[in-house]
Image (spheres, rainbow, N blue to C red):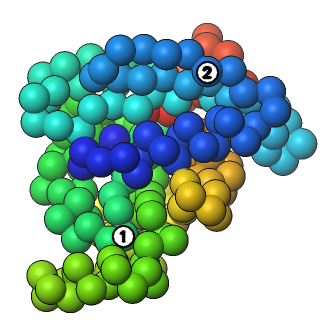
Amino acid sequence: MGSWGPHRTQASRHFTVSQAQGRRASFPAPTSALAVSVTVGGKQYLLGLYDTAGQEDYDRLRPLSYPMTDVFLICFSVVNPASFQNVKEEWVPELKEYAPNVPFLLIGTQIDLRDDPKTLARLNDMKEKPICVEQGQKLAKEIGACCYVECSALTQKGLKTVFDEAIIAILTPKKHTVKKRIGSRCINCCLIT
């Protein structure tokens, strides 16, 4: 979840394509889904990745995909300060309302553009700068995210770390309510929205 833009969908698709055993499923907008098998700590997990539409037009539909989600990835582009601001103003309040006991990670995307001359010139024209790692870490702590991770769909840097950390967040619940919510579901099957 996160502000509209190609960065979220590209990250999940690049990750699943890079996994040898990954399977893709196609769902119509406002949600797309992908499935991939990942090994963390010597154990294999099947991840179901749901990419929800961030546009305002889908505000009423998006929460319908939240039930039974094990972990959320709140994404923003490090070269789009407005998307960073939307994390606190839009996405965290939505999670607190519809999935208050589900862990979430804060994900900074498009890190390959942080040093791109054209991107820096565009941001400079708007009197803005890319979001730095420290800003991401500070916001993650402020909003109660499990962690802050950065990645690039283009270079694939950090992509595996994003999904490894998501699995770790699921396996180390902070509250007993998470354990109850998982109930009789297969613990080796994880749903990420």
Is 24 positioned to the left or the right of 76 in the image?
A: right
Q: How many marks?
A: 2
Residue 171's place in the image compared with 28, above or below, is below
Disc 1 to disc 2, C-alpha distance? 27 Å
Say which residue appears at 27% left-offset and 17% top-offset: 64
**Image quadrant of residue 83?**
bottom left
Is 39 positioned to the left or the right of 29 in the image?
A: right
Q: Which residue is mark 2?
A: 24
Say which residue appears at 22% left-offset and 71% top-offset: 81
**Number of other residues with Cα within 10 Å of mark 2, as a class: few under 14, some 14 to 19, many 20 or more:** some
Residue 54 image point, x, y percent:
23, 38
Quadrant location of the C terminus?
A: top left
Q: Amino acid at mark 1?
A: Val
Q: Amino acid at mark 2?
A: Arg
Residue 78's mark? 1
Task: Check contact, mark 1 vs mark 2: CB within 8 A.
Answer: no
Residue 170's mark? none
Q: Secondary structure at mark 1?
A: loop
**Image quadrant of residue 25?**
top right
The front one of 191 and 61 is 61
Q: Secondary structure at mark 2?
A: strand
Say which residue appears at 34% left-offset and 80% top-offset: 118
Residue 175 image point, x, y percent:
47, 41
The front one of 65 and 54 is 54
Quadrant location of the N terminus?
A: top left
